[in-house]
Image: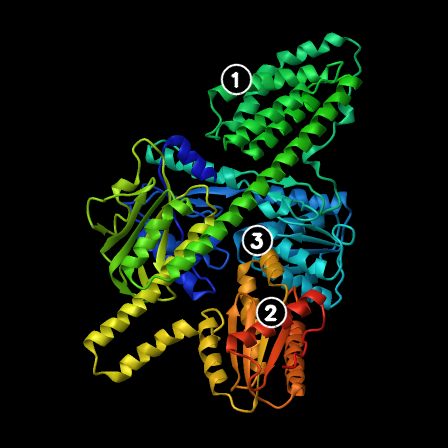
Amino acid sequence: MGLNNFCSGKNIDLIIFNGKLLQSFFKRDNQNNIIYDFINNNIVDGLVIPSFLFLFRESMENLLKFMRKFKDIPVVSLGTSIKDTINILVDHESGMRSICEHIIVHHSLKNILYLSGPREHPDSLVRLKVFKKVLDENTIRLNPGLIRYGDFTSQSGELIVRDLINKKIKFDGIIAANDEMAIGAYVVLQENKIMVPKDIIITGFDDIDEMNHLLPPFTTVRQPLYEMGEKAGELLLKKLNNEKIPEEVKLKTEMVVRESCGCLDLSFKKSDKKNIYINKDKKIHQSFFKEKENIIPLLRKVFISDNNFNGSDSELLNDFYDLLIRDIFSDNNSDLFVKYVNNLLIRKTIAGQLNINDWKQSMEIMKDFIYKNLYLESKALSQADEIFYKLDLILLRFIQRIESHKNFNVNRSIWELRQIIQNIRSASRYSELRDILVDNIKIMGIKLIYLFLYENFFENYRTPDFTIPNKAESFVTYKDGEEVAIEKKYIDTRKLIPDEVFSVNKQTTLVVFPLRSEFVHFGYVIYEISKLENFFYEALTEQISSSLYNIYQLERRKQAEDKLRNTLVELQELNNQLHNLSVRDSLTGLYNRRGLDLIGGERFDNINDELFAVFFGDLDGLKIINDTYGHNEGDYAIKTMAHILLNSFKSADVIGRFGGDEFVVIIDHVQSEHDLISITARIHKNIEKFNKNSGKPYNLSISFGHSIFEKDTYSSFPDMIKQADNALYSIKKKKKPYYVIIKS
């Protein structure tokens, strides 16, 4: 955000190359990193690399090897000191010292669990060293068993704390080396009914957005991420202009005290009683106006990077201060200042120009300035406290409105994306996919999309002799509400982005994604960043890539039919692949709804006198898993339940994913209702076994309804599914046990 705002203010175009960590656990993520190979000095004048992120799962040696690819480009390294680059570092030591001293000295804790990051990560080493030093300074003996190493992910925090609790190892506080691990620890504490901060104090490091929205809000250390981006842009611009710059800049961190350590939220603290000065001279407030020349520059500095704060707004800061002083010394408690701020925030919100963090910071500056530098008589002090308390409530209300509006927009974007994804999935030709994208771009709210396809698609690029294809063909070119013609149909990939993408009089922020399946690479897509959430662009890119892969497979089939009509073996193989795409669910590998309809209808038509049953199951609590732990965890729950069902039924039984969290099982040769009871018991036994050993913060469960077919009872296979679904609904509604028998 800081880098984007800096570039916007200086009319500098910004390109974001959306790769992943250099060594991801997921093969698909590794394929994403082809995007880094496009970076060259024909495309960018300078480069900002968040090197501290790469070091999460990468050695310094490999990071340096990666960065040598950009030796001809001025580079800013964020968070890690790299030779021959501009380094913007963070003072981890002071931030970690503040939080360690707060927990050890202020809260008098001694038996503290320390969740460290990776053993060799530079930030981990510094933060752990400070923790040990503060223990030593306070003559507290270090317990090596309470120093545990994670990998900066919430999952590692969960695993560590769950292991300690299971082993009944006691501790009265947790200091985590980052927020993600603190959140993971918090999840396990909740599972075990351990209250924060009543039973255990917990703190983090980074101050990610989630920390202020947890219950209770988390005490942590705020990293200056905005300032890092802003400073990166500033120094890189000076470097390009041949101005003298320091090789290294270190930015301060700040402890943010909230409630997870047992303190109240100090972000809106009351006045310091030591500053009270009783003076009966009512004219004392006149001297406050003389201090305006000192406070106004401080307030203006808050908004200097806000592109929505203009000259006229700057003049409002004078009224801002004058009204506050008048209300502090007012006899009739008019609340003019509070009303003024409220109305100003409303206008900014309507105009889409409200940066709530800037306004909150300005209130903090105003409050600290008045309490620390000026002296108030008792009545004025009381009124100042009351004013700042009301401002706290107003800002909280606006934060809630912003979050609510953001959630509304996210939900709306998700709904629109789902509709568009359905259309994209239906494309069977490249021209059809192109038309679908063009027709829906405006609906999606995308300002700009340029999509290019390689002349020849290729597979895994991670080979020693790999080079980026020289040319790519324009597939979709859309900007500002309409299709645009570009000068050349093919673009030199060393240039990557056509000149037409950039506006002469307007700064442009772009993000570039590769188009690829797990191994096949198709091209790349460029978006202009707008108010859409980041996940929207990534999800849309994934669906375009998936559709390209399906069309690619269809094209391969056509080519095989045209060229190798007599090679029946190869043709049959391709047909099987395409058949599986249509009848198999891509997430679980089970039959999809179409496959179930085909097989179920066939068995229904051919049934004789034997019993024939249909199970209809619904995975319990999937929405809670998705909302709490993310959609990746929800996908894991679905795949796990599919695996459990495969192990619970016979190989001859047909198991499918009907859609979302619903499963259908077709069972032949049922002898009696007792068979179904045995199957249900076997399913729940396998689920209990998984829940016991999974280490997950939730338990899987599934509710079943079923119908048994006897000759001439049902008119069709869909009718049987409907009856099983009705049975399931009854179970869910009445909260009955996991199954109910429907005798046909």
Crowd rating for badge 2 (residues with CA inside 10 Å; few <14, some 14–19, many 20+): many
Distance between mark 2 and mark 3 Cα atoms: 44 Å
Q: Nearer the viewer, mark 3 or mark 1?
A: 1
Q: Amino acid at mark 1?
A: Glu
Q: Nearer the viewer, mark 2 or mark 1?
A: 2
Question: How many neighbours does mark 3 have within 10 angstroms: few (below 14), some (14-19), or many (20 or more)?
Answer: many
Could you say whether the residue bearing mark 3 is in a helix, strand or loop? helix
* Residue 166 higher or lower than 524, as above or below: below
SS type, badge 1 = helix
Residue 513 position within the rendered picture, expressed as x and y whole percent measured from the top left: 37, 53
Residue 121 horizontal/vertical position (percent): 53, 55
Find disc 1 in the rendering and name its residue: 315
Which residue position is annotated with label 2? 618
Of 598 and 377, nearer the camera is: 598
Residue nearest the observer in this picture, 557 or 507: 557
Looking at the image, tell me whether mark 2 or mark 3 is earlier in sequence order. 3
Q: Is residue 377 above or below residue 87?
A: above
Amino acid under label 2? Asp
Question: In the figure, 20 relative to 412: above or below?
Answer: below
**Residue 287 left/right relative to 227:** right
Q: Is residue 52 visible?
A: no
Task: Report the residue marked by disc 3.
Answer: 124
